[in-house]
Image: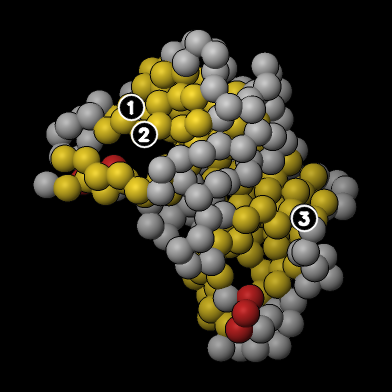
Amino acid sequence: DAKTTQPPSMDCAEGRAANLPCNHSTISGNEYVYWYRQIHSQGPQYIIHGLKNNETNEMASLIITEDRKSSTLILPHATLRDTAVYYCIVRVVGELIFGQGTELSVKP
Amino acid sequence: GAVVSQHPSWVICKSGTSVKIECRSLDFQATTMFWYRQFPKQSLMLMATSNEGSKATYEQGVEKDKFLINHASLTLSTLTVTSAHPEDSSFYICSASQGGGMGYGYTFGSGTRLTVV
């Protein structure tokens, strides 16, 4: 599976949009981009995934660049409960390999 | 949505004893389950892949005789930490897939905090 690069930490003001970037420059054509988050001392929670097109669900939006070498997870209106470590993972099938992720702190 | 139940959520055991952690898929059948370990301030590390009815596949550096995995049914996988030592203290997390090929995500359990004293 391709590796991903994420900033180690980010801050966001409550109520504002949180934009979390991810670089995956060596992604292959059939690899999906997945986003999970982990709130302290809990198991990871699925957020969203996509292949080529932008995706949106009730939690977030996923914007994938046309060349698929990077993506951005958007939390449209961040709340304090969105404070967590966010992981960007690329894979085809098989196990999920976690990188270091981005620690997002939402501040009042 | 898919739910994975992990039990116990925390356990304290004495050094030298064994501890069993259960991972159940409640509303779907999971052909494959995965076991992770997470130390404080670190990311999740994959320990092994568990396939129903066959032997688990362990990642490099993970002792298969110490971390026994059993996946006897499509809804249950267990991880037994044998002869536990303080360095085995960690957060253990399982995950399961509904299958269906590419594009399907995985559901994670809530984790088990193991403390060996």
Q: Which amino acid does label 2 sit on?
A: Leu
Direction left: furthest residue = A108
Are marks 3 and 2 in one subunit?
no
Dot 3: few (<14), some (14–19), or many (≥20) neighbours within 10 Å? Answer: few
**Which label was assigned to residue B59?**
3
Q: What residue type is labelled 3?
A: Glu
Q: Which chain carries label 3?
A: B
Q: Which amino acid does label 1 sit on?
A: Ile
Q: Which chain carries label 2?
A: A
Q: Mark 1 lies on which chain?
A: A
Label 2 secondary element: strand
Residue position for label 2: A20
Looking at the image, residue B89 lies above or below residue B25: below
- As measured in the structure, the alpha-carbon distance from the residue carrying label 3 to the one carrying label 2 is 30 Å
* Dot 1 and dot 2 residues touching (CB under 8 Å): yes
| Left or right position of A21 against B11 | left
Query: Which of the two discs, 1 and 2, labels the residue nearer the N terminus?
Result: 2
